[in-house]
C-alpha cells in the first residue's frame, strides 16, 4: 500500500510487553518519505493523540514508550505537521472540530495481546479514529498532487464535461463527443453515445445516473460502464447552448436544463416540460451557468453581469440584482455551485463571492487578489474552491472565511472543470501545446 513508507519495525523487546518500569521503548525506523506521525493510544473508551514532526527524513528513527493494556496506532504522513494543520505535541480532541488528516499509512501495535511483539499494517483508518474530531491549528490545509495525466494532441478540442461517477473515478468528455474515464490506473477511452456528435453538457443525478446533452439537443442517460440510452430530445434553438442541473445526492431526483436564451425545462414523467419561456441572451463578460437551490428551485447566471435568476418548478421567476464591489474594470458573475451543507454560492470574474441566505444573496468577504471564478467546487465539508485562472484557487471555510490563494493545476493553464472525488478532486486544465492536463489532488482533511 505504501511501499516507500513501509515501516521497518525493529522491536527492542524479545518478549511480550509488560508493565515493568524498565520496559525499553520500541524503535520504528521509517522510510525516507515519512515526514510526520500521529500516535493514537486507545485505553478502554479513551483516545489520546500526539503529533510528531520527524524532521530530517534521513533520520526517521522514532522511539515509542509501551503503554500496557492499550492499543497503539501510528498514523504516518508524507507531509510535515504544518501542512496538516497540526503542531508538535498533544492533539486536542474537539467534538466540534474537523476529522483527523487522512494518513498515508496506518500501523497498529496491540499492547494488550500476548502476541503483540510488533506492528502490522492496516488497510484503513480504524472506525474509532474515523469518528475522532480534533481542533486543527491551521484549517487552511494545502492540497497534495498525486498524479497528472495528459490527453495528448487534441489541438483546439477542449473538455466540456468532468463528472465524478464514484469515489475514485471521473468521467471526462471532450467537445467532439469522445468520453474517457480517469481512475487510479490512468485514462481509458470508453464508448460514447455521441458518435460523431458534439458534447455540450453533462451532469450526474441524485441516483448516480449520468446525463449527457449534445449541441443539437440530443440527450442520453446511463453510465460509462453500463452504456447509455437515448432520452427525449431537448428543444434547443439553432446556436443555443445548455446547462444541465440536478439535485445533490441527498435529494430526490430532479433534472433541469437552462438554455443560453434562458429558457428553462424540467425532465419529469419521461419528458421535458417548459417551465420558463426564452427571455434573453448571455451578457457580455458573463456566461451561462446554473445550480440547484432547493427542491423545485434552481438559479442561473449570465443574463446580465450582476443578475441571478431564480426559477421555480411552479413557473415562478425571481430576479436578484447583485451589487458587486467596484473594480477597475467592470465585473460580472461567472460561476455558480451548490455546496452541500452551506447552500448555493456564486463567484465573479473579479474576486467576489455570494452565498444564498434565507431570503437574499450575501456577499462573502474575499481578498481582491482572488482569482477569476472559472468554476466553483464543493469540497464536501461545507467549504468550497473558487477560481481556476492560471490554476489559482481561493479556498473558503465556514467559520473562518477565505484562505490564502492556492496554486492548484501546476500545469500553467486555466482550470475550467473540476470534479470532487472521495479524498480530494480532479482538475482539468485548458490545452497546453495541444494537450489537456488532468490532475488528481488529495486534500488531507477530507475523510
Image: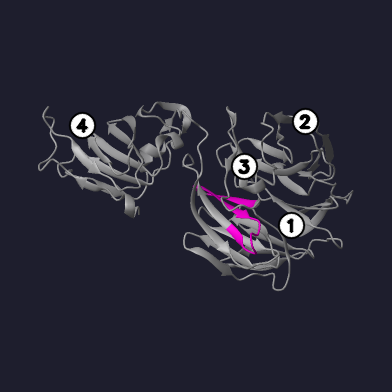
Residue tagged 4: 67
Q: Tell me the magenta residue range.
A: 417-437
Q: Residues within 10 Å of mark 3 (few under 14, many from 20)?
A: many
Whether 393 is among the magenta residues is no
Mark 1 vs mark 3: which is more N-terminal? 1
Residue 213, given in percent of the width and then of the height, sits at 73, 62
Q: Nearer the viewer, mark 1 or mark 3?
A: 3
Q: Nearer the viewer, residue 239 or 128?
A: 239
Q: Residues within 10 Å of mark 1 (few under 14, many from 20)?
A: few
Q: Nearer the viewer, residue 273 or 332?
A: 332
Measured in 3D between alpha carbons, the distance from the residue under mark 1 to the one under mark 4, in whole angstroms, is 63 Å
**Residue at figure coordinates x 34%, y 42% from the top left:** 76
Mark 1 vs mark 4: which is more N-terminal? 4
Question: Tag 1, which secondary structure?
Answer: loop
**Residue at figure coordinates x 60%, y 47% from the top left:** 249
* Res. 2 in view: yes
Determine the residue located farthest toward the bottom in the rendered image.
Answer: 196
Q: Nearer the viewer, residue 420 or 227?
A: 420
In this picture, is 266 found above or below 29?
A: below
Mark 3 vs mark 4: which is more N-terminal? 4
Residue 393, numbered label: 3
Q: Residues within 10 Å of mark 4 (few under 14, many from 20)?
A: some
Horizontally, is 219 left or right of 393 in the view? right
Q: Nearer the viewer, residue 312 or 144?
A: 144
- Name the image quarter holding the N terminus: bottom left
Residue tagged 2: 325
Residue tagged 1: 269
Q: Nearer the viewer, mark 2 or mark 1?
A: 2
Measured in 3D between alpha carbons, the distance from the residue under mark 2 to the one under mark 1, in whole angstroms, is 43 Å
Mark 2 vs mark 1: which is more N-terminal? 1
Amino acid at each position: 500500500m505504501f511501499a516507500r513508507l513501509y515501516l521497518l519495525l525493529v522491536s527492542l523487546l524479545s518478549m511480550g510487553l509488560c508493565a515493568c518500569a524498565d520496559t525499553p521503548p520500541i524503535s520504528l525506523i521509517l522510510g525516507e518519505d515519512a515526514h510526520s506521525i500521529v500516535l493514537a493510544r486507545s485505553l478502554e473508551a479513551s483516545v489520546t493523540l500526539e503529533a510528531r514532526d520527524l524532521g530530517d527524513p534521513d533520520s526517521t528513527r522514532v522511539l515509542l514508550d509501551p503503554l500496557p493494556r492499550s492499543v497503539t496506532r501510528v498514523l504516518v504522513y508524507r507531509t510535515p505537521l504544518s501542512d496538516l494543520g497540526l503542531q508538535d505535541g498533544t492533539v486536542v480532541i474537539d467534538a466540534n472540530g474537523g476529522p483527523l488528516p487522512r494518513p498515508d499509512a496506518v500501523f497498529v501495535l496491540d499492547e494488550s495481546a500476548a502476541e503483540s511483539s510488533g506492528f502490522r499494517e492496516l488497510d484503513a483508518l480504524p472506525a474509532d479514529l474515523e469518528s475522532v474530531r480534533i481542533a486543527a491549528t491551521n484549517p487552511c490545509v494545502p492540497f497534495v498532487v498525486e498524479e497528472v495525466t495528459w490527453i495528448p494532441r487534441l489541438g483546439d478540442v477542449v473538455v466540456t464535461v468532468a463528472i465524478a461517477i464514484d469515489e475514485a473515478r471521473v468521467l471526462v468528455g471532450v467537445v467532439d463527443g469522445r468520453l474517457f474515464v480517469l481512475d487510479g490506473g490512468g485514462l481509458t477511452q470508453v464508448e460514447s453515445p455521441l458518435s460523431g456528435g458534439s458534447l455540450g453538457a453533462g451532469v450526474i443525478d441524485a441516483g448516480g445516473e449520468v446525463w449527457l446533452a449534445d449541441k443539437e439537443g440530443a440527450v442520453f442517460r446511463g453510465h460509462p460502464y453500463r452504456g447509455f440510452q437515448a432520452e427525449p430530445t431537448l428543444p434547443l434553438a439553432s446556436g443555443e447552448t445548455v446547462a444541465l442541473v440536478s439535485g445533490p445526492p441527498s435529494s430526490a431526483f430532479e433534472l433541469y436544463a437552462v438554455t443560453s436564451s434562458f429558457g428553462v425545462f424540467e425532465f419529469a414523467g419521461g419528458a421535458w416540460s417548459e417551465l420558463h419561456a426564452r427571455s434573453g441572451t448571455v451578457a457580455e463578460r458573463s456566461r451561462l451557468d446554473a445550480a440547484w437551490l432547493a427542491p423545485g428551485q434552481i438559479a442561473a447566471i449570465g443574463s446580465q453581469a450582476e443578475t441571478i435568476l431564480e426559477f421555480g418548478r411552479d413557473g415562478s421567476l425571481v430576479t436578484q440584482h447583485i451589487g458587486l464591489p467596484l473594480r477597475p474594470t467592470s465585473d460580472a458573475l461567472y460561476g455558480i455551485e451548490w455546496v452541500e451543507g452551506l447552500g448555493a454560492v456564486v463567484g465573479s470574474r473579479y474576486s467576489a463571492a455570494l452565498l444564498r441566505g434565507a431570503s437574499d444573496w450575501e456577499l462573502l468577504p474575499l481578498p481582491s487578489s482572488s482569482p477569476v471564478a472559472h468554476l466553483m467546487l464543493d469540497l464536501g465539508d461545507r467549504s468550497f474552491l473558487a477560481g481556476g485562472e492560471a490554476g489559482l484557487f481561493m479556498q473558503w471555510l465556514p467559520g473562518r472565511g477565505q484562505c490564502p490563494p492556492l496554486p492548484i493545476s501546476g500545469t500553467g493553464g486555466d482550470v475550467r472543470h473540476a470534479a470532487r472525488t472521495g479524498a480530494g478532486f480532479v482538475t482539468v486544465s485548458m490545452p497546453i501545446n495541444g494537450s489537456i492536463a488532468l490532475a488528481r489532488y488529495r486534500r488531507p482533511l477530507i475523510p
